[in-house]
Image (cartoon, coloured by chain):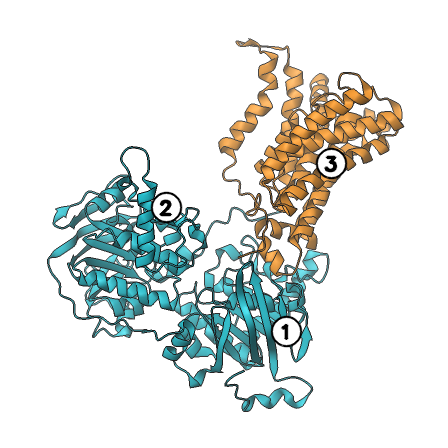
Chain colours: A orange, B cyan
């Protein structure tokens, strides 16, 4: 009986860990898309952020500098995206895809030429990473049945970025629905002309959104390489940027539901690790690949029909031109 | 300026205040090679309604956009209350007390009225206190100007008239003293337009200044104190409304004498060319929209269908043109029953000698991204070249010919159709359908969004078709148009023909009553079936207000 509780706690614990980059990327995408900029380049920004964080951390020995570098890389990518899609009114999807290619190539190339480890950055340890934080009383409460377990394992013992990710959700909800900035952000994604005729700069508002996007996704990238893992390896974002985007659509561009969807994807990922190699009655052992494909299959199925109509911000993907 | 009459407008001159709310001096604006505003002078007196009329492309909207800071003039001065200002953006214009109600509303559909009103004019970074304060302010405005509206309603669910009131509230909330309205009645039903004019009257009584851009002369005559006429980027004249007439204004707008009434001889009806029997048509959701309609159109006559929009005339038209499957009934062209089922119904209708000018040229009549010559053969492209290749030279020659005959301007074959004015686009569609020499011509809203000069031309072409012995079915929501063109008027209400009238003797009030179903003496259905669940007036409102609410944010 206790074993079941331990198992569940462990699965939930890894659910949280696996959901963090999705949550950060999803919220990042939310700001961008709410402002009317489609951001398929989340994947590339996540990867670039992960690489920059690991490289900086490996060189300087400071996880915090690594985090800054991760955010910086994402900002550069967002800047390019903004330039292409806001100033030059280019196609946002194409610009995003190009950034993804750029990130994949650049991280491998720079990783190889700087560290010569086949794309890996050096193994990080100690202060080069964000280590788990033990919340107060976690040890003392360990013996309290159930609650002690949940507090000690599930709530305590994560790194700082995990807590940031979870706090970012209510903060985003507040910004979006309770602040002047949020009102304008939602408006510019629905009808930029309404913003323009109200005397507010559409360009400036959209850049502001892209900056927030970059900060969040950069933190998400840093999480991958210097919090969850101990270094960067090739293509370590592994489609999480796309999954985060799917979660965003799924959540209809709302922060609360986005958190839930990301947790669900994290959960699927977590049980996928647990059921690998296990034998099921009648079926026998399921191939690893089939289990690994599960979250993706679910994404397709759910997006294809289960969520009903997901109405994107009306102006998403449309460059704003001031003409009649 | 010419004709300014400074008699009773001196009342506000007690203080340093100028009698002029707005004065534009020597405004010039170029868009590339186009000189959109040529040395414009305009003086608008405080507390008046000042009309600006002109055809599409005359430069009215450009001028107002300059005043509102949406564009910057190449040269010229703007004086607000007698003080020169450099208006660089909309925010600046708002700060000077100039508000604008755009032709296409600048509203966020999934926001509430309140959120739309405060957007961009929030007084703090926090939303809740901002909205609470705005709610009180809005209540005062609603009381003062009769602009009653639920502040918590989702804008996308409001009727067009209500949305326009939100736009007016937006401007007033920002402290506008001068209100610019750009073609405000283009999207309104007559009742909504009346409501708007009552509001404008109240605003004027409270001392606000209103600039009304329109091309409907009737509105100018009804509400304005003074009127300025623009033509091809120039200010032609400004004069007191009382000293002018619609005919005079039309002449100033177009630059030549325009007949507002159509001149035509008596019809000489021949044999029946189009016959509709017990036609039943449903809409996309299976709801019957045309409920057993019978009529005939003879060679050499124009039959007009009058009705409030949304009473089945669109479905009737689409069904006869082969674009919408009929549920039951028969359509005969030239005596031959025509089966119009299936996707190629429209092609078969054409083959049978029926041409169709659709109600909505942008949605059904043209592919706006295509060059003009391509649109000129659309639907008849099979006649150009054998085999898969298109005989482009022949097609272009045809298009050239159409453009010449129908005076399409500019006569540029390769210009994208979207870049033509509404009137010229419509002429292109009419040329394409009329020049095929059909037996029957079905026309929907022939002059919607078309300039006065072009209207005259289009009406004359339709009369010419009639005199050449064609049968013409005309559907229009403009009662004036129906009355002046038709030889017989059929009134449609709730999918049924509820009466026939002679345009020469028909009384407008009587027709209006029939169109709204209030005059039911010769309705052909048994009692109880009509009106079904809602009156057509409500149906119209429903159609105009998208009910889809699923994009609405909920936290």
Q: Position of residue A6 (x, y in %)?
A: 73, 20
> In the figure, is residue A221 to the left or right of B169?
right
Q: Secondary structure at mark 1?
A: strand
Q: Position of residue A320 (x, y in %)?
A: 59, 50
As drawn, A284 above or below A213:
above
Marking on residue A287? none
Looking at the rendered structure, whether the residues under marks 3 and 2 are on a common chain is answered as no
**Contact between labelled residues 2 and 3, with CB atoms less than 8 Å apart:** no
Sequence-first disc among 2 and 1: 1
> In the figure, is residue A242 to the left or right of B360?
right
As drawn, A253 above or below B478:
above
In this rendering, the label closer to the viewer, 2 or 1: 2
Marking on residue A74? 3
Observer-nearest of A200 and B377:
B377
Q: Which residue is mark 1?
A: B78
Q: Quadrant of the N terminus of chain B?
A: bottom right
Subunit ID for the residue under disc 3: A
> In the figure, is residue A305 to the left or right of B539?
right
In this rendering, the label closer to the viewer, 3 or 1: 1
Q: CA distance from mark 2 to mark 1?
A: 44 Å
Q: How many marks?
A: 3
As drawn, B211 above or below B523:
below
Q: Which residue is mark 2?
A: B374
């Amino acid at each position: 009986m206790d074993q079941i509780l331990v198992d569940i706690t462990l699965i939930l614990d890894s659910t949280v860990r696996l959901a963090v980059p999705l949550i950060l990327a999803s919220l990042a995408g939310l700001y961008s898309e709410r402002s009317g900029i489609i951001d398929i380049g989340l994947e590339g920004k996540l990867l670039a952020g992960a690489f920059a964080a690991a490289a900086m951390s490996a060189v300087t020995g400071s996880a915090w500098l690594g985090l800054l570098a991760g955010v910086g890389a994402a900002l550069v990518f967002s800047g390019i995206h903004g330039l292409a899609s806001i100033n030059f009114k280019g196609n946002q999807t194409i610009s995003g895809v190009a950034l993804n290619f750029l990130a994949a190539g650049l991280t491998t190339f720079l990783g190889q030429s700087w560290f010569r480890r086949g794309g890996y950055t050096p193994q990080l340890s100690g202060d080069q990473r964000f280590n788990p934080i033990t919340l107060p009383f976690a040890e003392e409460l360990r013996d309290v049945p159930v609650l002690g377990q949940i507090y000690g394992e599930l709530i305590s013992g994560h790194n700082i970025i995990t807590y940031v990710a979870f706090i970012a959700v209510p903060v985003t909800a507040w910004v979006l629905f309770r602040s002047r900035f949020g009102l304008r952000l939602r408006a510019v994604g629905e009808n930029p002309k309404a913003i323009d005729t109200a005397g507010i700069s559409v360009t400036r508002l959209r850049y502001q959104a892209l900056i927030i996007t970059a900060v969040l996704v950069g933190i998400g990238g840093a999480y991958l390489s210097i919090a969850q893992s101990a270094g960067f390896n090739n293509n370590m974002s592994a489609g999480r940027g796309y999954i985060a985007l799917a979660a965003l659509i799924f959540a209809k561009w709302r922060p609360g539901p986005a958190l839930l969807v990301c947790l669900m994807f994290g959960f699927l990922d977590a049980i996928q690790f647990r059921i690998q190699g296990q034998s099921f009655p009648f079926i026998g052992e399921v191939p690893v690949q089939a289990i690994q494909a599960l979250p993706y299959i679910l994404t397709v199925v759910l997006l294809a029909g289960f969520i009903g109509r997901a109405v994107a911000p009306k102006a998403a993907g449309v460059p704003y031109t001031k003409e009649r | 300026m010419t004709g300014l009459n400074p008699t009773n407008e001196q009342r506000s001159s007690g203080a340093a205040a100028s009698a002029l709310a707005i004065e534009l001096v020597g405004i010039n604006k170029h868009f590339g090679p186009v000189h959109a505003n040529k040395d414009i002078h305009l003086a608008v007196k405080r507390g008046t309604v000042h009309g600006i009329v002109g055809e599409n492309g005359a430069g009215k909207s450009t001028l107002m956009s300059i005043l509102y800071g949406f564009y910057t003039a190449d040269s010229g001065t703007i004086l607000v209350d007698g003080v020169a200002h450099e208006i660089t953006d909309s925010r600046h214009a708002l700060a000077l007390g100039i508000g604008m109600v755009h032709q296409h509303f600048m509203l966020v559909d999934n926001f509430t009225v309140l959120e739309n009103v405060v957007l961009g004019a929030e007084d703090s970074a926090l939303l809740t206190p901002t909205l609470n304060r705005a709610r009180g302010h809005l209540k005062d405005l609603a009381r003062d100007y009769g602009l009653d509206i639920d502040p918590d309603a989702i804008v996308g669910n409001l009727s067009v008239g209500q949305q326009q009131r939100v736009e007016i509230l937006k401007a007033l909330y920002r402290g506008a003293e001068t209100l610019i309205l750009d073609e405000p009645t283009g999207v309104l039903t007559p009742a909504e337009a009346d409501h708007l004019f009552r509001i404008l009257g109240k605003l004027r009584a409270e001392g606000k200044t209103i600039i009304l851009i329109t091309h409907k002369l009737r509105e100018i005559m009804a509400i304005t104190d003074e009127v300025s006429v623009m033509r091809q980027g120039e200010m032609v004249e400004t004069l007191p409304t009382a000293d002018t007439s619609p005919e005079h204004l039309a002449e100033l707008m177009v630059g030549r004498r325009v007949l507002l009434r159509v001149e035509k001889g008596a019809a000489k009806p021949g044999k029946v060319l189009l016959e509709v029997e017990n036609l039943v048509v449903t809409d996309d959701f299976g709801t019957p929209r045309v409920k057993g309609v019978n009529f005939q159109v003879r060679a050499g006559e124009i039959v007009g269908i009058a009705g409030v929009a949304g009473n089945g005339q669109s479905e009737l038209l689409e069904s006869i043109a082969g674009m919408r499957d009929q549920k039951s009934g028969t359509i005969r062209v030239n005596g031959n029953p025509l089966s119009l089922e299936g996707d190629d119904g429209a092609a078969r209708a054409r083959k049978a000698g029926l041409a169709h000018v659709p109600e909505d040229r942008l949605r059904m009549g043209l592919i706006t991204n295509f060059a003009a010559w391509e649109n000129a053969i659309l639907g008849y492209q099979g006649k150009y070249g054998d085999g898969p290749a298109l005989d482009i030279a022949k097609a272009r020659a045809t298009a050239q010919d159409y453009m010449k005959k129908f005076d399409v301007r500019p006569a540029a074959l390769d210009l994208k159709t979207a870049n033509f004015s509404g009137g010229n686009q419509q002429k292109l569609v009419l040329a394409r359908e009329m020049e095929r020499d059909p037996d029957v011509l079905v026309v929907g809203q022939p002059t919607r969004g078309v300039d006065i000069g072009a209207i005259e031309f289009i009406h004359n072409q339709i009369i010419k078709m009639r005199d050449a012995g064609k049968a013409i079915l005309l559907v229009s929501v403009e009662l004036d148009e129906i009355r002046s063109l038709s030889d017989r008027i059929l009134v449609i209400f709730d999918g049924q023909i509820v009466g026939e009238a002679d345009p020469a003797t028909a009384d407008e009030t009587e027709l209006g009553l029939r169109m709204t179903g209030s005059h039911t003496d010769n309705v052909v259905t048994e009692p109880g079936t009509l009106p079904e669940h809602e009156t057509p007036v409500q149906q119209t409102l429903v159609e105009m207000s998208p009910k889809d609410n699923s994009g609405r944010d909920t936290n």
